[in-house]
Amino acid sequence: MANVIPGTPSRVRDLVLGFIAGARAVVVFHQVMVFILSTVCLIQSRVYAMRGVSPFDVPTILNQMFWGGLWGILFAAVADTLPPWPLPLLGVAFGVLGPVLASWFVVAPLKGTPIAAGWVPQRMLAGLLINGFWGIGLALIYAGLRRWGSRSRQPQAV
């Protein structure tokens, strides 16, 4: 990925950009896929859901943006070590290998719900599509933010 996205001098700045990219990707890419899958009746879910999530009763969309941002930080931390694949492919791979597998095999047991979406193919496919599409958005938004940040720091011509 280093050959795709210009390097920046600040690691902390990249991690902040990763958080922003992950949260934004939830709002745009993740929720667009939720809308599409709901429209074709593959899932029954609300877009931009405001239902409270325990324990703090935070609106669902804000909870999803927070977790998307944390995954974005992880993406930013490893971005320069990833293979030089096209950004959409990197994003899909990250979205599926990170959030989906963590949700299926770590979060589900902690919540006392069935692992791997209960092995229900329709639910499994929905998780793969939603998080894969989110990953594409994450990679594209993060790359754009890094490029924009690199240009804005360059000295201006007089």
Image (spheres, rainbow, N blue to C red):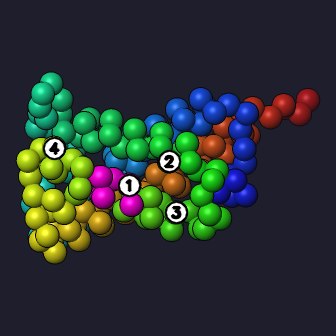
Few, some or many residues within 10 Å of mark 1 (<14, 14–19, 20+): some
Label 4 residue SS = helix
User: Is any part of residue 156 visible from this angle?
Assistant: yes
Distance, label 2 to label 3, CA atoms, is 10 Å
Identify whether 30 is placed above or below 68.
below
Asked if disc 1 and disc 2 are in contact, CB closer than 8 Å, the reply is: yes
Say the numbered circle drawn on residue 75.
2
Asked if disc 3 and disc 1 are in contact, CB closer than 8 Å, the reply is: no
As shown in the figure, which amino acid type bears the numbered disc 4? Leu
Q: What residue span does the magenta drawing correspond to?
A: 97-103
Please count the marks in the image.
Answer: 4
Distance, label 1 to label 2, CA atoms, is 9 Å
The residue where tag 3 is placed is 90
Identify whether 116 is placed above or below 141.
below
Q: Earlier in the sequence, mark 4 or mark 2?
A: 2
Q: Residue at x 65, y 57 (%)?
A: 1
Q: Residue at x 66, y 37 (%)?
A: 149
Q: Report the residue that reaches farthest toward the top.
A: 56
